[in-house]
Structure formats: C-alpha cells, structure tokens
Amino acid sequence: MSAPFVVSIPHSLGREEATRRLKTGLTRAASSVPVLQVDEERWEDNRMVFRLRALGQAVAGQVDVADDHVRVEVVLPWLLQRFAEAAQAAIRNRGSLLLTKRD
C-alpha cells in the first residue's frame, strides 16, 4: 500500500457548519466526475471515512473536520499514484468552494 497524501483546507465556518456542508459533498462531487463511484461514506463524529473507486481502482481515505480547517487524507493504489498531484489540486479546489463562507 502506498503512503497517503494529505490536503488541509482552511475555513472560517466552525466545525458544525463545515461538517454539515461536507455530509452532502462527497456524493455530489462523485456524481459530477463520471470515473468516481462512492462505495462507502461513514461518519464518526467529526470524521468521515470513505472508500471509492476511480478508474476501477479502490481508493480509501478520511476527512477530519476541525473548527478552522478540514484535513483530507487519501491513499491511492500504485496504479493511480501518477494522478496524486492532480487529485490533491482537485480536492483542494472543490473543498475550498464547498467551505467558502456565504453571507
């Protein structure tokens, strides 16, 4: 198994609001990317554990929600390692959009 990559996304929403937004975010994000299929999404307090498939490969990770940031940790199989940098950028961009405070 390969080493995980970590993305930290700052926010100013507070833990409760950030968690609320994220609870619908993974399935919505996966539905907009045809090569992703969510196999599992399980919340344990402020942590989401997930498994999904990308291009037929299993991907696992977790999302930890804090008061001022979200930490996403993803383990890619070696076949998808070449896409790690693009995946990090996509997670950071989509997460920032989801966690941007709207007045």
Image (spheres, rainbow, N blue to C red):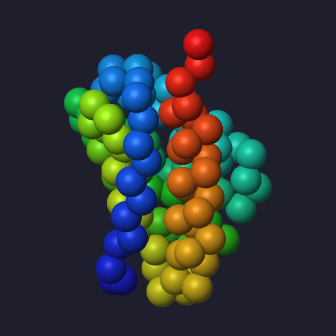
Residue 97: give x, y in percent of width and height: 61, 38
Give the left or right position of residue 91, taking residue 33 as reference: left
Give the left or right position of residue 19, taking residue 92 as reference: left
Is 6 placed above or below 94 here?
Answer: below
User: Which residue occupies 48% across, 86% down?
Assistant: 78
Choose top left, top right, bottom left or bottom right for residue 8.
bottom left
Residue 45 appears in the picture as rendered: yes
Please name whichever residue, 2 or 97, is drawn nearer the observer in this view of the structure. Answer: 97
Quadrant in which the N terminus appears:
bottom left
Residue 2: give x, y in percent of width and height: 36, 83
Residue 65: give x, y in percent of width and height: 31, 38
User: Which residue occupies 62% across, 58% down?
Assistant: 90
Quadrant in which the C terminus appears:
top right
View extreme (top): residue: 103
User: Which residue occupies 55% across, 49% down?
Assistant: 38
User: Which residue occupies 62% across, 71% down?
Assistant: 86
The mark total stands at 0
Please name whichever residue, 10 or 98, is drawn nearer the observer in this view of the structure. Answer: 10
Is 89 placed above or below 44 here?
Answer: below
Residue 37: give x, y in percent of width and height: 62, 53
Give the left or right position of residue 34, taking residue 6 as reference: right
Please name whichever residue, 62 or 72, is drawn nearer the observer in this view of the structure. Answer: 72
Residue 60 appears in the picture as rendered: no
